Amino acid sequence: MATKSRNLLKNHFSKVSDNPHWNLPTFLSRLDGSPVIGYIFNGQANPGQWYEFDAWRVIMNVGLDAHLMGAQAWHKSAVNKALGFLSYAKTNNSKNCYEQVYSYGGAQNKGCAGEGQKAANAVALLASTNAGQANEYFNDFWSLSQPTGDYRYYNGSLYMLAMLHVSGNFKFYNNTFN
């Protein structure tokens, strides 16, 4: 399962590289890693090609895999490119932030990144090779307060996982089941 998951992530990042996805993971992908374009099920809130709330965890999973299994070239490339786009977006945004939601590289005006997205990016740093980005995203996360309010469950879950990772307290248990 771990190998198949890793291959999916690796394939996905090779297929969202450059235009039109701007190196950001998407909300949905097919088993070969290609992004789902449009809607595939009733009630789906956003198109599958959007980088949005659930897609934040994709880059987090790349950092987690790199941390636990050893960073490979594709981990580093995926993280550096995705966070590079967000840094670029922040620099070129009048609000001096990167947005929560992008579709094909264009912001969807859902507001500046919040606790959950900043937490996911902090875990992604475990595969980063860009010291400037590492400082920027780590400080964005480390300066946060514990999430409260309407989205505290989702943002708080990502915050808690990120805190375990960046503080060196995340433990990997390898149990053998008989």
Image: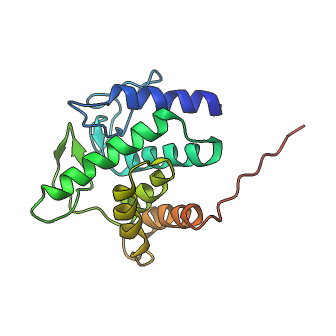
Vertical placement of residue 149 versus 49, above or below: below
In this rendering, the count of numbered labels is: 0
Residue 105 in percent (x, y) is at: 19, 40
Farthest left residue in view: 94
- Please tell me which residue is depicted at 57% across the width and 43% down the height of the picture: 65
- The picture quadrant where one finds residue 44 is top left
- The picture quadrant where one finds residue 145 is bottom left
Residue 91 in percent (x, y) is at: 17, 57
Farthest top residue in view: 32
Residue 87 in percent (x, y) is at: 25, 54
- The picture quadrant where one finds residue 33 is top left
Question: Tell me, what colour scheme is on the image?
Answer: rainbow
Name the foreground residue: 24 vs 39. Answer: 24
- Please tell me which residue is depicted at 31% across the width and 40% down the height of the picture: 24
Quarter occupied by the C terminus:
top right
Name the foreground residue: 22 vs 113. Answer: 22
- Please tell me which residue is depicted at 76% across the width and 51% down the height of the picture: 173
Do we see residue 151 in this rendering? no
Name the foreground residue: 80 vs 97. Answer: 80
Name the foreground residue: 177 vs 105. Answer: 105
Residue 9 in percent (x, y) is at: 48, 33
Question: Could you tell whether 7 is left or right of 176 in the image?
Answer: left
Question: Could you tell whether 136 is left or right of 166 in the image?
Answer: left
Do we see residue 20 in this rendering? yes
Quarter occupied by the N terminus:
top right
Question: Could you tell whether 66 is left or right of 177 in the image?
Answer: left
